[in-house]
């Protein structure tokens, strides 16, 4: 086995749990400490138009909507992106998808909608806090650019 290789189990733990395993204080590395925009929005330090919230998730209107309905659904806990979410986050990821579908129902998007999770540079992610886009209210083209 190569030295320095991360064990598969460790890869599946949350980013903060991994920091603890490494003997580092997770509090120092949270999204807040990194000045994360969406952490500030979740904590209402930066205003947003709330659409839905519960103990795990917060959803708000996108500031630069690309469709008549454009809502961002984010976990309260900071993860840089979908690539950071491990096996421990399966339930949370499912919850975020459920919340998106619930909002779509509430917004009467019976004709259809799209969920997008831009991930990393090639995925076009511009804010490094995991988020789902819910887009609807018009016919969306495919494929995206
Ligand atoms: P990404 O490009 O990372 O997939 O999506 C980031 C989204 O966040 C973009 O659609 C952008 O319009 C939105 N956004 C950026 N800054 C703000 C903000 O301050 N408030 C709100 N509500 N949305 C923002
Ligand atoms: Zn964050």
Image (cartoon, rainbow, N blue to C red):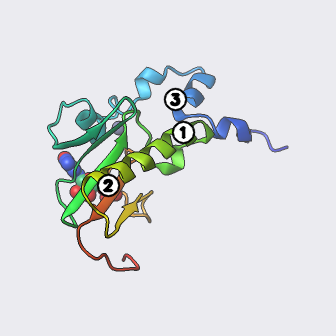
Quadrant of the rendering where the C terminus is positioned: bottom left
Q: Nearer the viewer, residue 132 or 83?
A: 132
Ligand number 2: quarter of image: top left
> Which labelled disc corresponds to residue 113?
none
Label 1 residue SS: helix
The answer, for residue 34, to whether it is visible in the render is yes
Q: Earlier in the sequence, mark 3 or mark 2?
A: 3
Label 2 Cα neighbours within 10 Å, binned few <14 / some 14-19 / many ≥20: few
Q: Select label 3 or label 2 by which is in front.
A: 2
Q: In screen coordinates, is 106 left or right of 6?
A: left
* Residue ID for mark 1: 91
Q: Nearer the viewer, residue 75 or 69?
A: 69
Where residue 11 appears, as percent x and y from the top left, is 65, 40
Label 3 residue SS: helix
Quadrant of the rendering where the N terminus is positioned: top right
Q: Earlier in the sequence, mark 1 or mark 2?
A: 1
* Residue ID for mark 3: 16
């Amino acid at each position: 086995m190569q030295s320095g290789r991360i064990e598969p189990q460790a890869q599946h733990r949350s980013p903060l749990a991994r920091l603890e395993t490494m003997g580092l204080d997770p509090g120092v590395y949270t999204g807040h400490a990194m000045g994360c925009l969406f952490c500030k929005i979740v904590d209402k330090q930066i205003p947003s138009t709330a659409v839905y919230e519960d103990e795990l998730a917060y959803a708000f209107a996108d500031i630069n909507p690309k469709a008549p309905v454009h809502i961002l659904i984010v976990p309260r806990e900071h993860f840089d992106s979908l690539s950071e979410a491990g096996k421990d986050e399966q339930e949370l990821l499912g919850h975020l998808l459920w919340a998106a579908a619930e909002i779509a129902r509430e917004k009467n998007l019976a004709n259809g909608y799209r969920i997008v999770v831009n991930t990393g540079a090639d995925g076009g992610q511009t804010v490094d806090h995991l988020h789902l886009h819910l887009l609807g209210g018009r016919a969306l083209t495919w494929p995206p650019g």
